[in-house]
Image (tube, grey):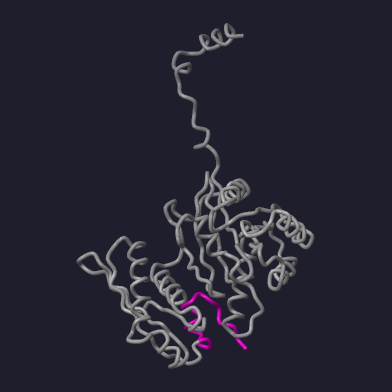
Amino acid sequence: MADDIDTAADALPADAAQAEPQDTKSEAPTRSGFIALIGATNAGKSTLVNRLVGAKVSIVSHKVQTTRAIVRGIATHKRAQIVFMDTPGIFKPRRRLDRAMVTTAWGGAKDADRIMLLIDSERGLKGDADMILDGLKEVHQKKILVLNKIDQVSREDLLKLAAAANEKIEFERTFMISALTGSGCEDVMDYLADALPEGPWYYPEDQISDLPMRQLAAEITREKLFLRLHQELPYSSHVETEKWEERKDGSVRIEQVIYVERDSQKKIALGKNGDAIKAISMASRKEISEILEQPVHLFLFVKVRENWGDDPERFREMGLEFPRG
């Protein structure tokens, strides 16, 4: 058999015999698509998007309904560009802002190539998760089930949870992961990279989000606000970047306004002797500076705007459609 191989090689032209094998990977078609990540509040969607993208594109806190509008995180894996749409948590809305967020989440699901339902394994199908499964029956895109926080639940309970969810909805695949540690996340990326349709990429290879920097900076400050004042400040507060000035020395001056609804909330945001607002400013400035890779001068102001949750302009600033009625 060895003689046959040698003879065949000798029969080839000299340049062909010496040629390097072609890189078939470079000839493989590119793939791209949008994945809507939906789930109940605090299921870990933003943590998972940040993990899959490999960088922070969505803010994270223990406060419910932290994500308010769709945040797109862009990941490249193999020959595929996967655009993850981190949607607001789905829950039973009570106020106008709640309705806008839930409507945005379902709208994002219907616009995606695939839907990824994230379920907190510790909570299972209780409450909002069961409601979301019922809502998904009306959505026709292919669906993927992802059980998160698997390190907190026994394997037997995970299998029961997966079976119960798949009885309600026909899922294309089921994955068990930990967004916090990254366990199982590579399997999700491998699957999506092969499952998305062939087509050109939507964004440049080095882009990780379509969120404007001004808006991302405001989101970072809102995250620090929630982390610092989790128990004391209602989630109905809002941050806007009002000024952004690139300076000759290479630094950037940023002015942001924290909107609250009452004077009592303003006092909480400022803190005793301004301690709270100073700590929030320091934490936010540090992270924004790391992302921009340049010095940042951040100035925060707290303003009272009663019933800002009924102001259409604030909704537009957040990227939400103002619900009438």
Relative image position of residue 277 (x, y in whole percent):
36, 80
| Residue closer to the observer: 315 or 58 | 58
Identified at 32% across, 73% down, the residue is 244
Quarter holding residue 323:
bottom right
Query: Is 310 covered by the magenta stretch?
Result: yes
Relative image position of residue 279 (x, y in whole percent):
35, 76
Identified at 45% across, 66% down, the residue is 211
Relative image position of residue 182 (x, y in whole percent):
54, 53
| Residue closer to the observer: 8 or 281 | 281
Quarter holding residue 48:
bottom right
Identified at 69% across, 60% down, the residue is 141
- Magenta range is 309-325
Relative image position of residue 108 (x, y in whole percent):
60, 67
Quadrant (top left/top right/bottom left/bottom right) for the N terminus: top right
Quadrant (top left/top right/bottom left/bottom right) for the C terminus: bottom right
Asked whether, in this view, residue 246 is left or right of residue 20, the answer is left
Identified at 75% across, 69% down, the residue is 134
Asked whether, in this view, residue 269 is left or right of residue 96, the answer is left
Asked if residue 236 is positioned above or below residue 285 in the image, the reply reads below
Asked if residue 58 is positioned above or below residue 162 in the image, the reply reads below
Query: Is 4 covered by the magenta stretch?
Result: no
